[in-house]
């Protein structure tokens, strides 16, 4: 039996080669690309402006992969968490967050994660595998199919399961599809990639020309503490990380975002705030402060709101833009650091609405 090529995840140049193999001109590839990504079509016979011979040939030799929708949960605050199944039986979680009339999609880039941050539940899964570009893109297409009339996903954040820069090539390829005018046409300023600090890949991303927003999960201002919380810091310590960020080619009027999860008695003290101020001095940036989201497998506790606000005041008094971010979707384990598919075998399909 002929192995079919999966078109979901191919970029425009790759689709041009597929179309050329069928004896069709290059402009047909642009139509095909737009049908798959711009319109989210999953059947060749719906591509009405393609010749019947091309549609028939594609149906015989190609496929359009799609994630399976296995479960859907809705939080009391309106956050939606989706469990999607991959073709190999693995599963991933994706989150859709409402915020002041806008929707933000939180996308996964890996099944599990190899980086084992001490406060993140995804890391307890270990690393299972990288997602393919089509699996990253298809999370957005699957969410779009579930939208209500009048809803639109305005922002994309690569902050779900996995470290995006550990899966650099697939992540960047997916981003090129997400921003392409014939693809999903997201402006780069509406996309944020979050990393714990893989320095060589940060440099590569800066030179890629994609222009997406960069967020860095920092969580500590000293190597001693960051080694404990974010083990990759032992490979890329703060001096190397901050040098790469200071050299990062920021678009005009853009800032690097630093994510800082506050952990009671660990990194939320005044001296931690003062260390963070010294570390960020002179850098065009903002800091998102998040209280730890607790879970039985995480050996830390959430700080009081008073400690969070005191930490914020220290930063603001030094002229640093610092925002306290509220956890969303806590009641369905959809908040930051809580995404994990416990067994990572294909679950029984189900839908739950809270």
Image (cartoon, rainbow, N blue to C red):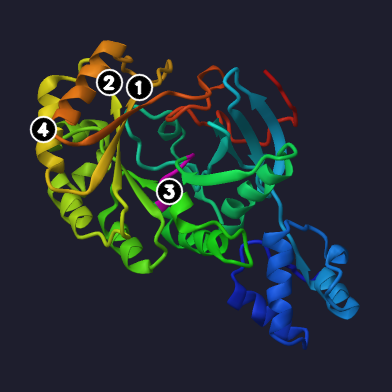
Is residue 66 in the magenta section? no
Q: Which mark is residue 192?
A: 3
User: Is there CB contact under 8 Å for labels 1 and 2?
Assistant: yes
Q: Nearer the viewer, mark 2 or mark 3?
A: 3
Residue 135 as seen in the image, left or right of residue 260: right
Q: For marks 3 and 4, give the CA distance.
A: 26 Å
Q: Which mark is residue 292?
A: 1
Q: Which mark is residue 149?
A: none
Specify the quadrant that holds the C terminus.
Answer: top right
| Mark 3 or mark 4: whose residue is earlier in sequence | 3
The stretch of residues the image draws in magenta is 160-164
Q: Which residue is mark 2?
A: 263
Residue nearer the viewer, 78 or 137 = 78
Residue nearer the viewer, 153 or 6 = 153
User: Is there CB contact under 8 Å for labels 4 and 2?
Assistant: no
Q: Is residue 200 above or below residue 4?
A: above
Q: For marks 4 and 2, give the CA distance.
A: 16 Å
On the image, the x and y values in percent for residue 338 come to 47, 27
Q: For marks 1 and 2, give the CA distance.
A: 6 Å
């Amino acid at each position: 039996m002929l192995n079919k090529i999966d078109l979901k995840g191919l970029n425009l140049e790759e689709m041009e080669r597929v179309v050329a193999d069928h004896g069709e001109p290059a402009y047909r590839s642009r139509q095909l690309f737009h049908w798959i990504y711009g319109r989210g079509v999953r059947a060749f016979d719906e591509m009405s402006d393609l010749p019947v011979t091309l549609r028939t040939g594609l149906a015989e030799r190609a496929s359009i992969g799609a994630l399976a929708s296995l479960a859907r949960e809705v939080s009391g605050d309106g956050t939606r968490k989706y469990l999607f199944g991959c073709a190999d039986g693995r599963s991933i979680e994706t989150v859709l967050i409402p915020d002041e009339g806008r929707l933000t999609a939180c996308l996964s880039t890996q099944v599990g994660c190899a980086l084992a941050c001490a406060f993140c539940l995804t890391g307890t899964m270990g690393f299972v595998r990288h997602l393919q570009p089509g699996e990253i893109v298809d999370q957005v297409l699957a969410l779009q199919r579930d939208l209500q009339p009048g809803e639109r996903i305005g922002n994309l954040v690569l902050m779900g399961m996995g470290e995006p820069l550990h899966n650099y090539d697939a992540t960047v390829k997916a981003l090129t599809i997400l921003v392409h005018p014939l693809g999903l046409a997201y402006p780069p300023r509406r996309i944020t990639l979050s990393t714990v600090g893989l320095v060589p890949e940060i440099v590569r991303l800066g030179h890629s020309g994609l222009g997406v927003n960069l967020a860095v999960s920092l969580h500590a201002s000293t190597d001693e503490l960051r080694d404990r919380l974010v083990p990759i810091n032992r490979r890329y310590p703060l001096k190397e990380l901050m040098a790469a960020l200071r050299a990062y080619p920021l678009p005009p009027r853009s800032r690097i975002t630093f994510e800082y999860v506050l952990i009671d008695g660990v990194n939320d003290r005044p001296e931690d705030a003062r260390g963070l101020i010294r570390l960020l001095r002179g850098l065009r940036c903002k800091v998102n402060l998040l209280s730890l989201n607790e879970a039985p497998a995480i050996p830390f506790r959430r700080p009081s709101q008073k400690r969070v606000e005191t930490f914020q005041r220290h930063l603001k008094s030094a002229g640093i833009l610092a925002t306290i971010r509220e956890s969303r979707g806590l009641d369905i384990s959809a908040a930051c650091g809580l995404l994990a598919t416990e067994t990572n075998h294909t679950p029984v399909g189900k839908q739950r609405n809270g």
